[in-house]
Amino acid sequence: MCHELAIRLSTQEAASITRGTAIEKCLAPPRSFMFEPMRQGQLLLCGDAAHIVPVSGAKGLNLAASDVHYTAQAVISWYEHGDGDGVAAYAGKGLARV
């Protein structure tokens, strides 16, 4: 890893890198966490506030974008039409995706 960093730095900066032996080379165990419900009253949780998925699952960004999409629909429906169905259905849609 220090070798790759040194390639990207200037000669002077690369020379000042303190190198040591690697103690451990392992990945953190993948854990997923889902906050349930994703809604408390009219507070809607989106992205990592609602669910944390490991990067290896390649779902985090897509889930966050979906959360924002459904939140926007719910908020627009609430303010334009006084319709709370989108807010009420938000948590169910989120659970179905995760």
Image (tube, helix red, strand yellow):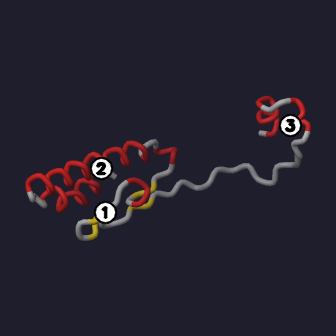
Going by the numbered disc 2, the residue's amino acid type is Arg
Binning the other alpha carbons within 10 Å of mark 3 as few (below 14), some (14 to 19) or many (20 upward) gives: few
Q: Position of residue 75 (x, y in %)?
A: 21, 54
Image vertical order of residue 94 relative to residue 3, above or below: below
Q: Quadrant of residue 89?
A: bottom left
Give the left or right position of residue 11, taking residue 69 as reference: right
N-term mark: 2 or 3: 3
Closer to the camera, 41 or 96? 41
Which residue position is annotated with label 1? Answer: 38
8 above or below 71? above
Q: Secondary structure at mark 2?
A: helix
Give the CA separation, mark 1 to mark 2: 12 Å
Which of labels 1 and 3 is toward the front?
3
| Residue on which the image places disc 2 | 97
Q: Is residue 61 above or below residue 81?
A: above
**Which residue occupies the foreground of this view, 60 or 79?**
79
Which residue is labeled 3 in the image? 13
Q: Position of residue 62 (x, y in %)?
A: 38, 42
